[in-house]
Amino acid sequence: MADAWNRKYVLKHKDVAVADIELDDATGAISAIAGMHDERHVPVGIPVKKGRIDRAALNEWWHGRAIPASRDGIQEALAALSVATTHKLLDKSLGLSLSDQYWICPSNAEADWSRLNFFENDFSEDVGNLLLGLRTTGENISLMSPDNTSDGWLKKKWTVIDGKRCLIKGGSGAIQQEPYNEVLASRLMERLGIPHVSYTLLVQDEYPYSVCENFITPQTELVTAWYVMQTRQKPNHTSVYQHYLNCCEALGIPGMVEAMDRMIVVDYLIANEDRHQNNFGVIRNAETLEWIGAAPIYDSGSSLWFSKPQALISPTAKLVCKPFKQDHQEQIKLVTSFDWLDLSALRGIEDEFREILQGSLFIDEARCEALCFALRKRIDMLAEIVHSRSLRIWVDDRSADVTENIAYSGTPADDDWEPDR
Ligand SMILES: Nc1ncnc2c1ncn2[C@@H]1O[C@H](COP(=O)(O)OP(=O)(O)OP(=O)(O)O)[C@@H](O)[C@H]1O
Ligand SMILES: [Mg+2]
C-alpha cells in the first residue's frame, strides 16, 4: 500500500486525527512526526513534551502492534507471504486492530473509520489461516486482516462466529494444554463471580484451540497495564504493584484494588506463570476517553504446569510468578481483602477440570490426575492463607483492644492488617 512516493499517513483514533506521520518503506518504522493534531488522543503512555510526541516511544508502540517475532510458526508464515518482518505487515491493514481503535490513514486518501474498521466490516482470514497453519501458500492472499496486529506468542486468528468477532488460539509444544487451561480458568472465575473473558474449547484436526469473543466494542479499547504504567515515572522506592495503582488512581480509573485482588487470587489458584504487563489492563471509551475500569481477566492459559513434565506437577513447587512478585506466596500477600472470596464455590472444580481434559490426545490419564490433584491442593493452600490472615487480624484486633483499654480507656484502634507492598 505504501510506496516510495506515498509514505505519509495520519495516525487516527477512530475519526480523530492524532498526528501526521511518515513511515520508512524499508523498515516500516515511523521516520518522522510532522505535526500533532490532538494531544488528548495520543496513545496512552506515549510522552508528549512541549507539544511534540516522543518519536522513539511512538515507534515502540507502533512496532508493538505487530505480531511478535517470537510468535510460534511466524517464520514459515512470513516466508509464504514473502514479507521480511512482521512490522512490514502493519501498514498493509492500516494498523487496524480488534483490541483498540488506532489506525493510519494514507494522507492522500479519503477514508473513514466506519468503512474500514474490523469490528463492523468484513476482514480476510487468509493471514490468520496461514498463521494457524491451515493454509501454506501466500498466493492471492488478502492482507486486510486484524491478525497483522495481534499480540502474543501462541498461534491465533480472528474469525467471525454467529456475527461475533472471536479469537481462536492454539496450544504449544507436546502437551497443548493452554486451551484447556483457558476453559478451566473461565469456569473457576465464573464460580467465583470474577469478571472474565469466557473461553470455550474447539478441537480441529485433533488439535485443541480456545475460542473467546472480543471483549472490545467499536466504542471501547484495551489499554494494557504496561502502557498505564508509562503514564508516570516510577520512583525507585515504589513497588510495581503500588505504581500501577497510583497510575490508575491518577487517571481516575475506578475499582482497581478490587480488580487486582481478584486477578492475584486467580493466578495463585491456577499457578499462572505468565501474567505479564500486557496480559491485563484497563478499558476506556475510545470516543469520550472516559475510563471504564479493569479489563475482564483474559489470557490465563500459561498456568497449571502447562509446560512441565508430569513429574514436576507439584502444587507446592516454586514457579515463575508475574507481574508484581516473583513468587505466588509473596504476591498473594498483596491482596487487600478476601472478604468477597467464597472458596466453597470451587467444590468439585477438579472434577470439572477432569471432564474438560477428557478427550485430549496430548494429556494422558496420569497427567490429568496429577493436574486435578494439584488444582485441589492450590485451593486448599489458599484457604489456609485466608484462614491465617483472618486469625491474624483477629489476634491483632484483640491485642490492640487490650492495649488501647489499658492506655486510653477504650479509644478505638486503627491498626488494620497492612500487607508488605
Ligand atoms: N477477547 C479478546 N478481545 C480483544 N482483544 C483480545 C482478546 N483476547 C486477546 N486480545 C488481545 O490479543 C492479545 C493476544 O492475546 P493473548 O494474550 O490471549 O495471546 P497469547 O499468545 O496467549 O499471549 P502471551 O504471549 O501473553 O502468552 C492480547 O494481549 C490482547 O491485546
Ligand atoms: Mg497474552
Image (cartoon, rainbow, N blue to C red):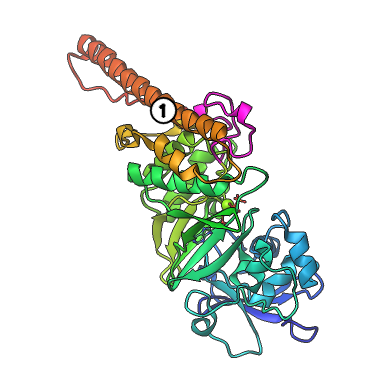
* Vertical side of 110 occupied by 319: above or below: above
- Classify residue 76 as left or right of residue 112: right
Task: Point out residue 200 in the picture as x, y percentages from the top left corner.
Answer: 46, 54
Report crowding for label 1: few under 14, some 14 to 19, many 20 or more residues within 10 A (C-alpha).
Answer: some
Residue range of the region highlighted in magenta in the rendering: 303-329
- Classify residue 189 as left or right of residue 315: left
Task: Point out residue 67 in the picture as x, y percentages from the top left corner.
Answer: 67, 61
Instruction: Tell which of 57 and 385 is nearer to you.
Output: 385
- Classify residue 89 as left or right of residue 170: right
Using the rendered view, name the quadrant where residue 32 is placed. Answer: bottom right
* Residue at far top of view: 406
Using the rendered view, name the quadrant where residue 295 is placed. Answer: bottom left
Q: Which amino acid type corresponds to the residue marked 1 in the rendered image?
A: Leu
Across the whole image, how many numbered discs are drawn on residues?
1
Whether residue 17 is in magenta: the answer is no
Residue 358 appears anywhere in the view = yes
Q: Main secondary structure of the magenta part?
A: loop
The residue tagged with tag 1: helix, strand or loop? helix
* Vertical side of 246 occupied by 382: above or below: above
Whether residue 309 is in magenta: the answer is yes
Q: Could you tell me which quadrant the N terminus lies in?
A: bottom right
Q: Which residue is mark 1?
A: 382
- Classify residue 288 as left or right of residue 306: left
Task: Point out residue 177 in the picture as x, y percentages from the top left corner.
Answer: 57, 44
Please give the name of the residue rendered at 57% of the width and 87% of the height, measured from the top-left corner.
111
Please give the name of the residue rendered at 52% of the width and 26% of the height, measured from the top-left corner.
315
Task: Point out residue 3 in the picture as x, y percentages from the top left corner.
Answer: 77, 83
* Vertical side of 310 occupied by 32: above or below: below
Please give the name of the residue rendered at 41% of the width and 70% of the height, measured from the top-left corner.
288
Residue 54 appears anywhere in the view = no
